[in-house]
Image (cartoon, helix red, strand yellow):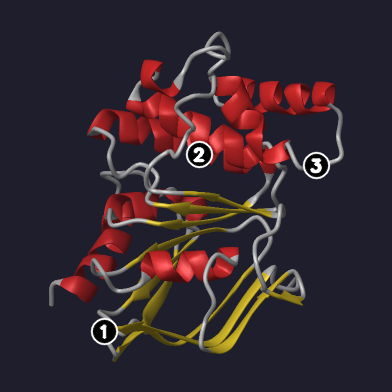
Amino acid sequence: MDNPVIQVNNLCKSFLIDGTNLEVLRNINFDIYENEFITIVGPSGCGKSTLLKIIAGLIPYNNGSVIRNGKSVSGTCLECGMIFQDHRLFPWMKLKENVAFGLTESKISKKERNNAAQKYINLVRLEGFENAYPHQLSGGMASRAAIARAMATNPAILLLDEPFGALDALTRIHMQKEIQKIHKEEKITMIMVTHDLDEAVTLGHRVIVLSPRPAEINNVLTIDTGNGHYAGTTEFNHYKNILYKHFFN
């Protein structure tokens, strides 16, 4: 087996709140390999988003280690993109400017930045809206724009923190298909936090199941994608029932 692109070893994280030490993550261990799509589920408030932000280098951890492509994580880098629960587009910028924003500090020319932005605008099927402002986009379009912005820096790893949580059911299904298409075409390692068990099974090659806080790993469920795992199929219901039993025994 290839070397993992992410290694999380005995990871512990606590927050100091009003003088009290609040333990959030306890002895988290897992490896993630190139081109995998990993989904993470767990009770609300258990630390899923905290785990994702630690992998991204956005917040420090207390003990253990997080290795990204052979190097200890210490701060953010362009090889690791992140999409948050809200789209976080700058309201004063047009769509193409938003998508190109992550490249402003790079050494490439303005023309190259524009070309990269246009490539990913096309990839998420937003061509024709390059000059639209965020308030002129629907929720699904704004989510696609956020994906394009994260992709424009050409990350090897894409972290997604419940990016479709605020969307209606039909738009959410459409966005799941979009992210599957991007994962297949761009061959990026993806890690998504979700509260939706259907979404976890639909997208994940493996599903990491976290316990209530302080979060520990209850299970790592491997999805047999070769047999298909679409909603309503026997395989899909089998995997979903396993996850369901973790939370509703």
How far apart in space, not on screen, are marks 2 and 3 (Cα)? Answer: 26 Å
Element assignment for label 2: helix
Q: Which residue is mark 3?
A: 106
- The C terminus - image quarter: bottom left
Residue 97's disc is none
Question: How many residues crowd mark 1 within 10 Å: few (<14), some (14–19), many (20+)?
Answer: few
The earlier-in-sequence mark between 1 and 2 is 1
Location of residue 19 in the rendering, given as x and y in whole percent from the top left corner: 29, 90
- The N terminus - image quarter: bottom right
Q: Which residue is painted at 53% across and 37% down in the image?
A: 147
Q: Which residue is mark 2?
A: 179
How far apart in space, not on screen, are marks 3 and 1 (Cα)? Answer: 40 Å
The earlier-in-sequence mark between 3 and 1 is 1
How far apart in space, not on screen, are marks 1 and 2 (Cα)? Answer: 40 Å
Element assignment for label 1: loop
Q: Which residue is painted at 50% across and 65% down in the image?
A: 53
Q: Which residue is mark 1?
A: 18
Q: Is residue 88 above or below residue 7?
A: above
